[in-house]
Image (cartoon, rainbow, N blue to C red):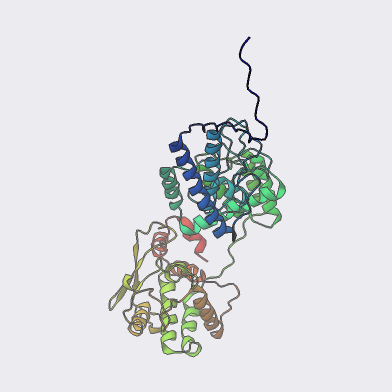
Amino acid sequence: MGPKKAKAKSGGKRVRPPPRPAPVSDSSDEDCDMGTVRALIARLEALEKKKQGGAAAAEKGGPSGIPASSRSITRGAKRAKLIQSLSSRLDALESREPCPTAPAVDLTSDGDGAQATSETCSRDTHPSAPLGPGSALSPAGARGGELARPDAGVALEPWRLEAQRAVWASLAPSTRAAYSRQCRAFQDFRTQVGLGQDWPPPAEQLMQFLVHLKGKGLSPGAMAGYLAALAFHAKAQGMSDTTGDFRVRRMLEGWTREHPVPLDSRRPLLPAAIQGAVGQFSAICRSPYEASLFHAVTLVLFFGAFRAGELLPRGHRSPVLKVVQFGDVSLGPDIAQLRLRFSKTDQRGRGQWVSLHRADNALLCPVRALGSYMTRRGSAPGCLFVHEDGRPLSQYQFWTVARRALSAAGADTAQLSLHSFRIGAASAASRLGLSGETIQRIGRWRSATYKRYVR
């Protein structure tokens, strides 16, 4: 029989077992990860406060939406998912078009969930965003009930962006703006009627869009412009062109046969009407300088068979570098030469010289009128035709004053326009018995189109 145990003392303090040692952890990796998380959270709070007007309310379970009950996930996996979620939200906030809400991270899934990037979110929430280099018509997403393209959320590589920019730069600025506007109109139409946003668009959608345009009163020529914009956008993205479908083209041909293109009703401005108008400028204009300005523009526009946009900007905010500048003029005693920078048939700006010759009639001599104006103007650089205060003369201003002068001279201005100067130049040359080749050379036409200008 073993020794008996001693009786425990009564009234003494209970003896506590010694504490267990804490488990050893890899503090270097954890400190590094948590430091990264703290930095990401600080950036997130600063960006949300800056872009949303205050710190965003934290979601339940943390800023990344981590479920509080996910205990089966290891701490390393939680840290990785937390960093991934914070990075996605930061990318969205730092992008140009931030997503309205950040996607929640589901730690119970074992794969990489699909995350909406800033590009995808911007295109889904802004279907009317301008089109151009590096942009594409957005897929339907939740709106159209179709799945987005596999590459919808993939950022384009730098070389692809530069390639697309170069393709769009091949268009004239006005054509580029028109194509973007027409593509947005087609995209808005599909959104309004609930059509899918497939790209390239099916022929049936194009046919429905053309019927819609016809209901708005557009001509077949205008509808062909919309098709040209959609065709260019598809080809620029490396996709097939569905606008050449047999049914689409036959629809336009059928409407053209039903409603033939009306003849051009604009009348030409002939030398007799122009001589009467230039005699009225001194009474209409507020100063001798302005009278000399409008006199020179009228004769240069007519005898050079210029388009108005080659000499004058459209408005105050229109670009002025493509119109004739002061340094583009070479003035002699019997001849004046103007360098035409850009034209409808010279979109790349190779340039062309236009010659104006001296006339016996002083009122209709473009060389004298141009020389008198340039003497008053001075040698300041900029547009050739400017007001006395240096502002460029716009097409609207010139035609307003010219029409008043024509009315004062007794001319009927009902069917006249700025293009009547060019029509008048071709008509006057034909009445003088000049050959078709000579008329083509005067108006810089490259085909028999000049025949449409002869009245």
Q: Which residue is situated farthest in the left direction here?
A: 332
* Residue 117 position in % (x across, y down): 55, 44
Q: Nearer the viewer, residue 117 or 1?
A: 1
> Which residue is more in the foreground, 51 or 386?
51
Q: Position of residue 172 (x, y in %)?
A: 45, 56
Q: 190 above or below 304?
A: above
Could you tell me which residue is drawn at 52 percent across and 74 percent down?
Answer: 396
The location of residue 241, given as percent across then percent down, is: 55, 40
Q: Give me the residue at 59% from left, 72% from top.
A: 415
Q: Is residue 186 visible in the rendered structure shown here?
A: no
**Residue 97 vertical position relative to residue 195 in the rendered view, above or below:** below
Horizontal side of residue 19 vs 440, given as left or right: right
Which residue is nearer to you in this view: 391 or 123? 123
- Vertical placement of residue 75 versus 287, above or below: above
Please tell me in which quadrant of the rendered image residue 387 appears.
Answer: bottom left
Q: Position of residue 80 (x, y in %)?
A: 52, 37
Q: Quadrant of residue 334?
A: bottom left
Query: Relative to 174, is 349 on the left or the right?
Result: left
The relative height of residue 32 versus residue 406 in the rendered view (above or below) is above
Q: How many marks?
A: 0
Q: In the rendered view of the protein, which quadrant contains the N terminus?
A: top right
